[in-house]
Image: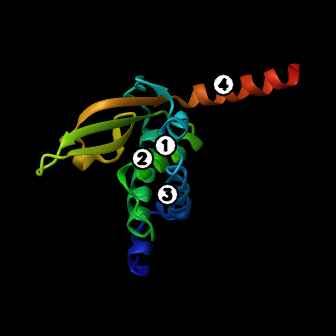
Amino acid sequence: MRIQRLLLLSPEVRKLLPEAWLELGWARLRQRRSFGDYSRVWGICMEETPWQCDVRQEKSIQQISHAVELASRYTPWRSSCLVQAAAAMTLLGRRKLDCTLYLGTAKNAAGRLAAHAWVRSGPIYVTGKREMEAFTVVGIFGRRAVMATNTKKMKDKGSSLL
């Protein structure tokens, strides 16, 4: 990325770029595991999160979307739609933002099966928006930030009782 372009970015997006780049790398490495193991962190199967959020959250979601999209252009590995979606979900989760991962399939021009993944948080599509219209949703994973926090607290309490 040219320095001039980097300086034109908002300070928030500039700050997110290294974190997004590293998360893309971790997501690419995690993708080597089995699907069942890999998909466990995505949330509850076939559950969507709310379509509403407040203005502050929308700004943060848009910044994450921009950072993941930019960082994915500059990775030495292939940052597929699924890698971008997983990285975005991690970044959103760290900021206590609900998100939903969609998995879709379609037939491409050659008649072969194609797959796509995209993430939505509130009313904003964080990754994969351009291509999503061509795909039929076959899987949904919703992750609520409150649920993740409560699950962690429950695990902590459970381990202290033993």
Q: Nearer the viewer, mark 3 or mark 1?
A: 3
Cα–Cα span, label 4 and label 2 = 23 Å
Residue type beneath disc 3:
Leu
Classify 155 as above or below 92: above
- The circle drawn on residue 24 is 3
Q: Measuring from the top left, give residue 85's x and y in whole percent.
A: 42, 46
Point out the residue furthest to the bottom here: 3
Residue type beneath disc 1:
Met
At label 4, counting other C-alpha atoms closer than 10 Å, the crowd grade (few under 14, some 14-19, many 20 or more) is few
Q: Is residue 14 left or right of residue 147?
A: left
- Which quadrant does the N terminus fall into? bottom left
Circles 1 and 2, Cβ within 8 Å, touching? The answer is yes
**Quarter of the view holding residue 15:** bottom right
Give the mark, 4 or 1, whose residue is nearer the N terminus. 1
From the image, tell me which residue sits under label 2: 85
**Quarter of the view holding residue 99:** top left
- The circle drawn on residue 150 is 4
Q: Secondary structure at mark 4?
A: helix
Q: Secondary structure at mark 2?
A: helix
Task: Please tell me which residue is depicted at 45% across the width and 71% down the height of the picture.
Answer: 76
From the image, tell me which residue sits under label 1: 89
